[in-house]
């Protein structure tokens, strides 16, 4: 299996995992066991105290950490220093640096990353499209029920 196929499979797995969060709890009997396995192999990390809240909305930093863990990104970019809302002692500092190096993450502005903001569907899909290196505009938006609500910047992804 080549590197791009692995990245696409990983991106699909991440998307499926995040989207499953909207299903009723009873439909996710495997959830607790899977979360424990991911924590044991450092794919998934909880908050600073180590607690993981499966029913809470996911923030940008958590999603980035999940993606990096699942896809094994390890190289870091120094460009993380340009973002004023990220300090070197933040738990997500190294994950943001890895995401920037991997090329799948952009700031919410030239000086802000907004790591503690809840991630939107648009942001998540744009990240996954960058990872999978999908062709811009390859998804037909006519099949997306809320297509009129998609921000202009996210439509290509």
Image (spheres, grey):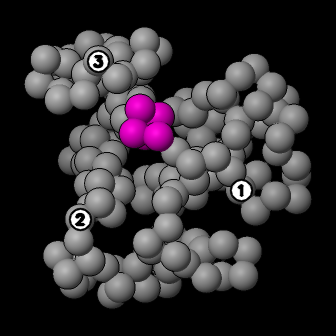
Res. 23 mark = 2
Residue under circle 1? Answer: 92
Residue density around tag 1, few if under 14, some if 14–19, many if 20 or more, within 10 Å: some
Measured as percent of width and height from the top left, residue 114 is found at 70, 40
Majority SS type along the magenta span? helix
Query: SS at mark 3?
Result: helix
Measured as percent of width and height from the top left, residue 46 is found at 60, 74
> In front here: 143 or 136?
143
Query: SS at mark 1?
Result: loop
Measured in 3D between alpha carbons, the distance from the residue under mark 2 to the one under mark 1, in whole angstroms, is 27 Å
Q: Is residue 31 left or right of residue 36?
A: left
**Label 2 vs 3, first from the N-terminus:** 2
Rendered-image quadrant of the C terminus = top left
Residue under circle 3? Answer: 148
Measured as percent of width and height from the top left, residue 23 is found at 23, 65
Q: Does the image show residue 5?
A: yes
Measured in 3D between alpha carbons, the distance from the residue under mark 2 to the one under mark 3, in whole angstroms, is 24 Å
Residue 125, by quadrant, is: top left
Q: Which residues are magenta?
A: 120-124
Q: Do the CB atoms of the residues marked 2 and 1 lie less than 8 Å apart?
A: no
């Amino acid at each position: 299996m080549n590197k791009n196929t692995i990245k696409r499979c990983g991106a699909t797995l991440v998307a499926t995992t995040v989207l499953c969060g909207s299903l009723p709890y009873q439909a996710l009997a495997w959830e607790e066991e899977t979360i424990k396995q991911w924590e044991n192999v450092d794919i998934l990390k909880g908050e600073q105290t180590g607690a993981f809240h499966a029913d809470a909305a996911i923030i940008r930093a958590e999603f980035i950490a999940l993606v990096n863990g699942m896809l094994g990104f390890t190289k870091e970019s120094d460009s993380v220093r340009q973002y004023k809302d990220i300090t070197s002692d933040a738990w997500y500092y190294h994950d943001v640096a890895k995401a920037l190096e991997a090329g799948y993450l952009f700031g919410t502005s030239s000086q802000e990353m907004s790591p503690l903001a809840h991630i939107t569907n648009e942001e998540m899909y744009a990240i996954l499209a960058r990872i999978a290196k999908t062709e811009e505009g390859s998804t037909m938006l006519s099949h997306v029920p809320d297509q009129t609500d998609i921000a202009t910047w996210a439509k290509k992804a």
